Image: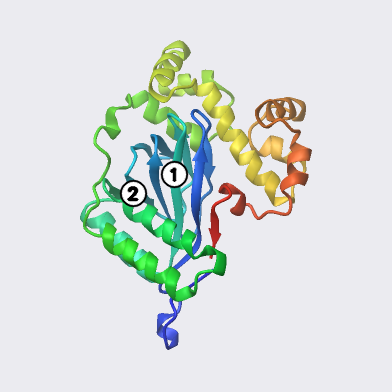
Amino acid sequence: MLHLEAPGRFFSGLLGIPLAGWLRLTAGALRTLPEQPDAWMLVCTVEGRVRATWEDGSWLLEAGQCAAFPPGISLGLLPLEDSTAGFALLQGSAADAVLQDCARQGGLFFPQGGEALERMLRLLEAVQRRQPTAREASEQAYQLLMRLYGTGKSEPEGSRSLPWVVEAALGILRREFAFLEGIGELADRLEVSQEYLTRVFRASIGMTPGKYLTQVRLEHAKLLLRQGEHSVTFVSGACGFSNGNYFARVFRENTGMSPREYALSDAALPPDRDLLDDSLYVL
């Protein structure tokens, strides 16, 4: 983890980038970025189109667009086609001050901000072999913040084009995936028929609400398994699967390995590190 190099204790923790890199996303395959309690998440789409979903809403990010998400948000990335995204965590009082001001003045969606985040990632990539210094990383983070500052909007154009029932369903699915009994219960809570919900959800998101729920559960199961601290039975129940055998079958169908095999193969990797692909910068 890097912080700004500056004299005196006053500057400690001003600006740092603990994690950054690229995400290779396959069409229709949900990717979850777990909440970061003390870091802002910045995401840009380099190629393709990616819908970012969280408990309170969703945004469609086109190529060249960027969005920032405050600490404490669990973010789902659902690519509508094979896509490449850039990702960075920013920590420190400078990041807090600038991005909070962006939220107050205009918003945290940056229509032209993808180029700035992509540029920072490529510069870090260029010096990755010799490990960027704290000053280099913080300088790039500061330049990124200055390029984004004053250009934010409250949301992408057309972001509210999703039917209300789909927006509401996404929020419940991401917030209550571990406790939801099924799509029938979801439809009842939204006071619509299951058939109508399934039809509208599929037309808007590209998959049924049942498949989306399964993918959310699987992504959270992967995060728990990567920690190497929980039994398969615990993970199954914690993620909302009805029983361990069903969980194991669904997990193998989606990953090609059993939960236990997956846990053993990834046990040595920190949970956050495995979010990203080969081009990863742990700074």
Q: Residues within 10 Å of mark 1 (few under 14, many from 20)?
A: many
Vertical placement of 183 versus 73: above or below? above
Where's residue 48, x and y in %? Answer: 39, 35
Using the image as rendered, state which of residue 230 and residue 4 is in the foreground: 4
In the image, is 118 to the left or to the right of 33? left
Q: Secondary structure at mark 2?
A: helix
Residue at (50% x, 53% y) in the render: 21
Q: Which of disc 2 and disc 1 is earlier in sequence?
A: 1
* Circle on res. 85: 1
In the image, is 124 to the left or to the right of 61? right
- Residue indicated by mark 2: 114
Residue at (40% x, 84% y) in the render: 10
Residue at (28% x, 57% y) in the render: 148
Where's residue 181, x and y in %? Answer: 59, 25
Where's residue 136, x and y in %? Answer: 43, 72
Q: Secondary structure at mark 1?
A: strand
Using the image as rendered, state which of residue 165 and residue 253 is in the foreground: 253
Q: Report the Cα–Cα distance between label 1 and label 2.
A: 9 Å
In the image, is 185 to the left or to the right of 42? right
Q: Give the mark count.
A: 2
